[in-house]
Image: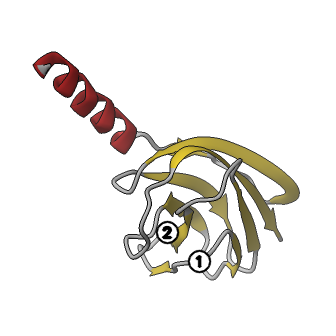
């Protein structure tokens, strides 16, 4: 039994440290990033490049309903905004590497365990 608990804890650490990185050059072609959320303690981050004046459009797609959303967007200097729902349209006001965080809401009940896709488009 101890071995199974240790294995689960190790899996949880691996999932918590996993980050999705998409170094996206500005353009109007949407990119899709696939990921997996492992409950309320988990979050996934998508990183992309954009420049001041661009607009980012993100759509979170899941095969089932649940407690998962675009939690926040973070600028290159660390300013963040959010939470959002399943969709995000955001005017970029700084050039550099931005981050979108996908996670569950701590105010909601059930944890989301499962796959997701984020469709990301940066328009200049």
- Cα distance, mark 1 to mark 2? 19 Å
111 over 34 or under it: above or below: below
For the N terminus, the quadrant is top left
| Residue 104: x %, y % from top left | 47, 63
Q: Secondary structure at mark 2?
A: loop
Relative to residue 37, is residue 65 depicted above or below? below
Q: Earlier in the sequence, mark 1 or mark 2?
A: 2
Q: Left or right: 101 with respect to 41?
A: right
Crowd tier of the residue under label 1, counting other residues whose Cα lies within 10 Å: few below 14, some 14–19, many 20 or above: some
Residue 12 percent coordinates (x, y) = 31, 37
Q: At x 63% / y 82%, what residue is drawn?
A: 93
| Disc 2 crowd, CA 10 A, few/some/many (<14, 14-19, 20+) | some
Residue where numbered disc 1 is placed: 84
Coordinates of residue 61 in the picture (x, y in percent):
72, 55
- Based on the displayed image, in which of its 4 quarters is residue 6 positioned? top left
Which quadrant: the C terminus? bottom right
Taking the image as shown, residue 17 lies to the left or right of residue 23, namely: left
What is the secondary structure assignment of the residue under circle 1? loop
Residue indicated by mark 2:
76
Q: x, y percentage for residue 72?
A: 51, 72
State the residue in front, 6 or 98: 6
What residue is at 67 percent from the left and 51 percent from the top? 64
Between 84 and 30, the residue placed more toward the observer is 84
**Most foreground residue, 104 or 50:** 104
Quadrant in the rendering for residue 26:
bottom right
Kindly identify the residue that appears in the image at 27 percent across and 29 percent down. 8
- x 68%, y 45%: residue: 33
């Amino acid at each position: 039994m101890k071995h199974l608990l240790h294995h689960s804890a190790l899996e949880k650490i691996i999932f918590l440290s996993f980050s999705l990185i998409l170094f996206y050059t500005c353009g109007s072609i949407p990119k899709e990033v696939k990921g997996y959320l492992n409950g309320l303690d988990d979050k996934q981050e998508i990183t992309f490049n954009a420049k001041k004046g661009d607009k980012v459009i993100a759509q979170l797609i899941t095969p089932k309903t649940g407690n998962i959303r675009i939690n926040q967007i973070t600028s290159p200097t660390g300013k963040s905004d959010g939470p959002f729902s399943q969709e995000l349209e955001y005017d970029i006001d700084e050039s550099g590497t931005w981050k979108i965080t996908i996670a569950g809401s701590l105010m909601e009940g059930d944890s989301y365990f499962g796959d997701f896709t984020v469709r990301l488009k940066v328009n200049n």
